[in-house]
Image (spheres, helix red, strand yellow):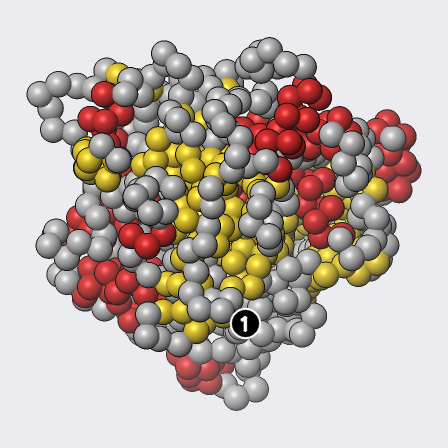
Amino acid sequence: MKSLTHMGVAMAVMLASACSPGDQSVQKNALDVKANSDFQKQLLRKLISAKPGDVVLIPEGEFQINRSLSLNVDGVTIRGAGMDKSILSFKGQIQGAEGLLVNASDFTIENLAIEDTVGDALKVNEGENIIIRNIRVEWTNGPDTENGAYGIYPVQTKNTLVEGSIAIGASDAGIYVGQSRNVIVRNNHAEFNVAGIEVENTIGADVYDNVATNNTGGILVFNMPNLPQPGHGTRIYRNNIFKNNVANFGHEGTPVAAVPAGSGIVINSNDNVEIFNNDIADNDTANIIVSSYFTAGYYSDKSTQKDFDPYPEGIYIYDNHFTGGGESPDHLELKALKLARFGLGGSIPDVLWDGVVDRDKLVDGELPDSLKLCIDNADAGIVNVDFLNDYQNISTDISAHKCQLKKLPQIVLEFDQPANEGKTSSHLAVLEGANG
Amino acid sequence: MDNWISWGGSALLAVGVVMSALSGCDKPRSQVVVFTENAIPERLSDWNLVNIINGALTPNSGVVPYDLNTALFTDYAHKLRTVWMPTGTSAQYDEEQFNYPVGTVLTKTFYYPRGEGETVLRTDNFANDYAEGRAGEALDMKRVRLMETRLLVKREDGWQAIPYVWNEAQTEAVFEIAGDTSRLQLKKKAGNVSEFTYVVPDANQCAGCHADNFTGKEISPLGPRARHLNRDYPYRSGAENQLEYWQKIGYLSDVPENEILPSQAKFSDASLPLEARARAYLDINCGHCHNPAGAADTSGLMLNHSETDLRRLGVCKPPVAAGTGSGERLFSIVPGEPDHSILNFRVESVDPGAMMPELGRGLVHEEGVELLRQWVSAMPGTCT
């Protein structure tokens, strides 16, 4: 890539020395993209020829873009005038699987909106120190299977912060962090997605102070097979997760398509997940679902790497505030179960567990404490649906889950200094001054 | 400016401009000029690699055309590929990737044979593209419409991609990093016309494919590797194996002796085994991203030529983050069932959010699609 970064410079030099009229807009630092009919081409050129330290400014206005944008240069900031002011609209996109594709480290994107992309809105594929802040990704027609899959999509990244952002209408996950390490997802709002926020095959994630509502599932923590990195160590806390009851509009075959509408939090196959101090309310299937990969519907030796661990282990649920939920579950089996077990006016308990454990790890018929599903949450109940035996031995006995686990460490991102929290605007001004 | 022979920068540019204006009567031809990476000329003609001379796009002396056993599909465009190396240098043979000398320039010109009116032709036949008596070498400008010419130049620190887009008048190709689009009407022989948008990728997108090691971001040539080049080419001196010809002219050294060199199948050659044809097609069309170090390693699906694990190749493999690309199907490949295989769905799609490859095409490659359907259909077993 190093060579490509020189091309913009080369172009500017050539245009000057050849005395041709043309684009003189390639500048050294703050690149103020002017709003005009050639906006797309200018923006493409600025992104392609950017140099480390550049700030690409997106002005106020709505700009039509019909092909993917991409950035491959480290140390670049893309900044708009606000998530409702600087809008990149991809309605009518003819090319590219993303709105903006980034393969770079030390990347910041903030204060703009990406709307109606044909595929994913913002994908960051590989990179360290990624800041995604105060952006809006939205499919403006609302929930629709034909919408793009992912809104905010960092994958195979290290040290990533997603904050203050809004994700609406994704046909898979509004905010999806995949195969990454050291992640903070906070203060975001996810609505009308199949999955509001999803953390997949990621090691070390803190998900807090988010709002997830009107999704099919609010917050998901999954592990998928056949990938180099199994995930573990996610903390979900202080989130407001309510009324995630939108009918599943995901594409069949995708992992989220198996998520029942009305799921607050779903843990699937992932280990060491801590769920605490959340407000979780009125999710019609269950406020929390803990399940193994077997429930995803296609577990077989042929489909799964040999050493894949399909069991969710070391799940710790405590001090959450539950209200309502479980009153009208999705999926036939769950409807029948609810009716048979809890009655017409009853509801599924706060925690729905598929009851699948790794039999090889049992000691005297019991899992070691560190692998258990532990619930220390006032009067919250559980239902074990005995999934592998076709719902034969359904149990609501919580005694086996009255345990405590060692708490997980906080995720710390070096660039995320506490002094900067809540002072976004002054922090930005400093940045601009430094680069301008 | 190391490689500029003797002139100063602006003087050379002026020469370039004059040259292209006089193209056709400017003889003897100036030699290839390798511009430094910070001084890329605005006009392709300044390089003296391929120029329009006497109504034909003509490679300069030492600019040697080549072809691949199986090539990337790009909306039925025809391609004229060339290689040039500085005098006295040669590429060192290596099975996976040659070590090209600094100063090597590869060109790839995308074009279509012209049809009636404004149409361009969809045809496998290249014979009519060339100027009289210049088969395999010079493109007859009356018979072709040029779209873009991409350069890969080997620098001290790696390859540089330099894209040029041909103008409407077909007189010059201009340096353009932001890509381009043109509406084209593509006519099949005795068939109807399909209108589509030909998209020239931007420079980052070029790199997106050519960085087959996505983490390192180093770009490299994808076509001119041993297994793709190991075939005959109709040189003016007669048909000859390309690897042998490159050695003969001094462009290739260190080729192992008494060893059978790798050769990938021609995907359209029905006399070859289906497996070899399909894997060759997947390798050149998908393997640059779907390999263990590629951009698509996030998917766990590996389609590069050296993959042998069936599940990693997609057999009974559930998708990870396919989104719209799942096509409501459960596995990348269901043996015997192309209509239930995500891989087939994605190569048959033209929805940018679902289709594969993600870039480089707006049309379905009917012949490629058919091959992959046959391949999946012939696979034994089930996923249950």
Left or right side of A423 for B34? left
* Residue at horizontal 58 percent and vertical 15 percent from the top: B4
Nearer to the camera, A87 or B269:
B269
User: Residue A144, percent across and down?
Assistant: 58, 74
User: Residue B232, percent across and down?
Assistant: 20, 38
Q: Is residue B268 above or below residue A147?
A: above
Query: From where the camera sits, is residue B348 visible?
Result: yes
User: Residue B174, percent across and down?
Assistant: 61, 41
Task: State the quadrant of the C terminus of chain A.
Answer: top right
Left or right side of A229 for A281? right
Q: In which quarter of the image is residue A86?
A: bottom right
Nearer to the camera, A219 or A321:
A219
Task: State the quadrant of the N terminus of chain A.
Answer: top right
Nearer to the camera, B302 or B65:
B65
Left or right side of A333 for B352? right
* Residue at horizontal 16 percent and vertical 29 percent from the top: B261
Residue at the disc numbered 1: A146
Q: In this view, does B370 lie above or below A41?
A: below
Q: Is residue B241 above or below residue A342?
A: above
Three-letter residue code for mark 1: Glu
User: Residue B278, percent across and down?
Assistant: 23, 53
Q: In this view, does A162 lie above or below B358?
A: above
* Residue at horizontal 82 percent and vertical 35 percent from the top: A30
Chain letter of mark 1 equals A
Residue reaching furthest to the bottom? A344
